[in-house]
Image (cartoon, helix red, strand yellow):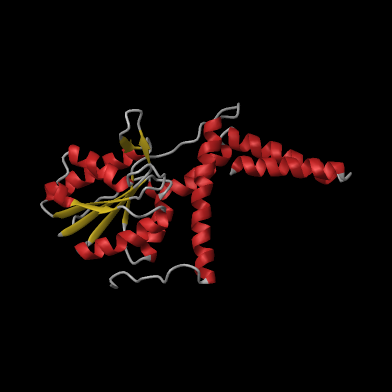
Amino acid sequence: MSMDVLIVLVLLGLALRALKWRRTAGAALWLAVLLFLATGCGLLPAWLLDSLQEPYARRPTIAWAPRNAIVLLGAGAERAADGTVEPGEPAHSRINEALALYRECKASGMGCRLEVSGGDARHIGEPEAAVYAAVLERMGVVAADLLLEPRSMNTWQNAQFSAPLLRGYGAQRVLLVSSATHLRRASLYFAHFGIATTPVRSDWLKERMDWWPQSWNFAVTDLALHEYVGVLRYHVYNAMGWNAEATSPGDA
């Protein structure tokens, strides 16, 4: 996304230069250079990530209810060289955090379910929910405590398809586990479908400040921009009446 903007600015500058609009062309090209440096050297991603992740820096203190649900959002799956399907690299921190919460909940003596949400978005033959659930069972999660939502292809559907499962279980407290960058958008979507959540981050992204532009900074900038665009799109769609009807917490 960030590289797309840079390419557009460069092409615009060259086109304006060809049209003899030299000052405007120079401004576009200089803007491209400044944006490239601000992104690659870490200034822009630092600003974007700080605003996106800061509300979730501290993990919450949890007062367990009689019936609790821990919602683990998928982060991809991959088919390994031996043909098996396993969680993608970004998923492991989410799985570990969800497992830690599950163990804490079980130790409290309260009711607990671990819901895994994720379909086969990458078309590799198995939904993320089933892949992650198999890993969680090997790590000690009781099969009867797992709720699987294997249809969702994106975060909006994570929320849409999880809501009936959580209501069916009668969850009184819902913990939403995902990356810190993802929690703002995910919490917003779950609230739209009437599920009040306690967000819990699994990982934390940082820019890499350097005088020389780093490819990592472009990657995390694109990730952050994807989240901001998702939040903006939600509000635009709501204003236009394009979203599914919102559900108030407690409604069936």
Q: Where is residue 14, by image quadrant?
A: top right
Left or right, 35 with reference to 149: right
Residue drawn at 65 percent across, 36 percent down: 36
Q: Where is residue 192, by image quadrant?
A: bottom left
Instruction: Give whichever of 150, 212 is nearer the camera.
Output: 150
User: Residue furthest toward the top?
Assistant: 212
Q: Is the residue 83 above or below the residue 189 in the image?
A: above
Residue drawn at 39 percent across, 51 percent down: 183
Residue 204: image x %, image y %? 40, 39
Residue drawn at 53 percent across, 70 percent down: 239
Residue drawn at 63 percent across, 43 percent down: 4
Instruction: Give whichever of 50, 72 is nearer the camera.
Output: 72
User: Residue furthest toward the left?
Assistant: 109
Left or right, 249 with reference to 172: right
Residue 62: image x %, image y %? 23, 52
Left or right, 10 with reference to 222: right
Image quarter hosting the C terminus:
bottom left
